[in-house]
Amino acid sequence: MKKMVIAGAALVSLAVPAAAADLPLKAPPRAVVAAYDWNGFYAGVNVGYSWGRAETDPRATEQVQVFRGVPPVLPVLADTGVVGAGLGIARADVNGVIGGLQAGWNWQRGTWLFGLETDFQWSGEHGSTAFGFTIPALVVPAAQGTVPALAGVLTADTRLKWFGTLRPRAGVLVTDRWLLYVTGGLAYGRLDSTYTAGLTGFGAFASTVSTTQAGWTVGVGAEGALWGNWTAKVEYLYMDLGSVTGGGIAGTVTASNVPAIGFSTVTTVTAAPTTKFTDNIFRVGLNYRFAH
């Protein structure tokens, strides 16, 4: 009997390892990859190009006065008043390279992201336009003559020196590492506008206006996680900085023996131009999200 028990134990000890060898092997547990965390403060740099448009309304008037003799010694014989007004709208492309800094804060709620971003940009945008105008010929019965027509040119030169924005943004995470967003808010910028007007043959006169304008901006963008805390973005903004009104541009020219011998004319051109500025901004950027 004792021999039978010993033999049975031996058989069991041989069978257990064999049965264990036939069991399927379990794969080692996979490491859980945490979803990308967008929360917190970030800052970065950007570079891009802008296609701006300056639309200038010269709002110019011209006045011709006729004197017997040399003005202003003798009374005015004829005062034509305003002989021309509104020279139309002049449009100029104001394009150039831009670059700057941005910073902001993100709040992530599931697949939704909300944030606030500000940026400041250096701008190389510049453009100008020139167009001609004509003061029509005038018949002056008192002088028994005609004041000939005069041609003139008005030039508007616009520069955007710098600009910035302050914008909330909202977006959706299409994956944990890719964000699509919309944005919009305050825009501001420094505009330099130089206006030059003159009558052909009599030289030119100019006025420069430099002002910081406030306006608005809207846009869309996409941002993706790269490695570590780094992200890259591409963005389009439309910006409207409103209108700049220049100071009065005034110039006076005097001509003798016009319209007849013994008569003189004084021609005055006055302009109070207004320039409306809008911009299309395309830029790419690199951000670093600081741990929190």
Image (spheres, rainbow, N blue to C red):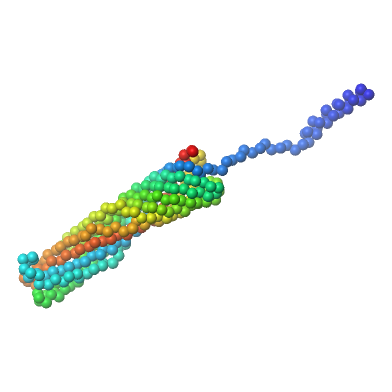
Provide residue 70's location: percent of width, then percent of height.
Answer: 7, 66
Q: Quadrant of the rendered structure where residue 143 is? A: bottom left
Q: Quadrant of the rendered structure where residue 2 is? A: top right
Q: Is residue 82 left or right of residue 166?
A: left
Which residue appears at 33% of the width and 51% of the height?
189
Q: Nearer the viewer, residue 142 or 7?
A: 142
Placement of the N terminus among the 4 image quadrants: top right
Provide residue 99's location: percent of width, then percent of height.
Answer: 37, 47
Q: How many marks?
A: 0
Examine the rendered structure and indicate whether residue 43 appears above or below residue 270.
above
The furthest residue to the top: 2
Examine the rendered structure and indicate whether residue 237 appears above or below residue 44.
below
Q: Is residue 216 left or right of residue 264?
A: right
Q: Is residue 128 visible?
A: no
Q: Is residue 13 visible?
A: yes
Which residue appears at 15% of the width and 75% of the height?
139
Provide residue 78's location: percent of width, then percent of height.
Answer: 12, 72
Which residue appears at 46% of the width and 42% of the height?
41
Provide residue 159's location: percent of width, then percent of height.
Answer: 30, 53
